[in-house]
Image (spheres, rainbow, N blue to C red):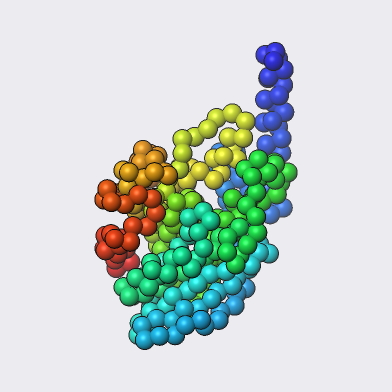
Amino acid sequence: MKRSTKIILAILIATALFLFIQNRQKGVSDWYVTSEGILKYPEDRGSVDFTRALLEDNDTYTIDKIVYDSRGKQIYALLYMPKGKENIPCVIDLPAAAAAKESYSAIAKGMASHGYAYLVIDQRGVGETGGVAPPIAQDYNDFMAGKEPFLHLMVYDALKAFDVLKEINGVDRKNIVMAGESMGGRAAIIAGSMDSRIKAVIGYSTAGYEAKLGHGATFISSFNPNTYVQNISPRKFIMFHSKDDSVVPYNDAMLTFDIAKEPKKFVDLPETCDHGYCLSNMDMFFNELKELTD
């Protein structure tokens, strides 16, 4: 390709991106991406529409099915609430890719036994929430056409989960932590950076990635946790990661942690842990969570 042709192509791409951003910023939507590749959603997201149905009531906790509306999509969640407490600190948990909310029952029961409310969702494309996660190329095409990409909607779903908890009696609205595992950890970091009312953020077996340049860089940046993690400060950010993680490289996690600002903490998981929540070492997790919510 001739140099002049490359220049013209670059100008056309830059112009299209500029017009796209301008369109978002003219109030067409409460969603837009800046020229630096930063996704924007407001802290005031309006009222939240949800239903709550009791599934289980035992001596120590209750389990409710929560169904809430998020951008016209019904998001399904389970809420575990310990009994005999008021002003209960709560953890929102965003599961790993393809992981259903029911698979977190052991973690949920541990949360309840330690005195935490716990809300875990079926993310888009998973479980009762359903739908199909599109290929990244389609998400990019939607983005360039001015439509909200699937990856952005997952972040909004996390923010609306926070809005739901603010309406639940017994939950300490000033003591809600956003957490996520693997792919869910990426959405947790991004959502947690956007709403200053979220008390702290936990990333478990997750990381961002090095910045990409060239065609599509703005779109890629918009769902890269490394674009956002420094904005969690002055709230606390904690990462849990194993050096033997076979899915998300340890060095990637360290890069994300290095970008984050204080207060922050990196917890090395034992060699016996690989990827995802390490049930044999959950005492370590609860010790850190207690420091966040005290």
Give percent across and percent down for residue 67: 59, 72
Q: Is residue 42 visible?
A: no
Which quadrant of the rendered structure holds the N terminus? top right
| Outermost residue toward the top in this view | 2
Depth order, front residue of 139/20: 139
Give percent across and percent down for residue 269: 29, 51
| Outermost residue toward the front in this view | 272
Q: Identify the residue shown where x is 53% and y is 32%.
A: 212
Give percent across and percent down for residue 74: 64, 67
Which quadrant of the rendered structure holds the C terminus? bottom left
| In this view, 218 is above or below 175 | above
- Please count the marks in the image: 0
Depth order, front residue of 78/260: 78
Q: Identify the residue shown where x is 46% and y is 39%.
A: 209
Q: Identify the residue shown where x is 47% and y is 82%.
A: 56
| In this view, 27 is above or below 214 | below
| In this view, 142 is above or below 157 | above
Q: Is residue 238 visible?
A: yes
Report the side of 199 relative to 290 (left or right). Answer: right
Q: Identify the residue shown where x is 60% and y is 40%.
A: 219
Location of residue 248 (image quadrant): top left
Give percent across and percent down for residue 48: 60, 71
Report the side of 139 relative to 244 (left or right). Answer: right
Depth order, front residue of 49/282: 282
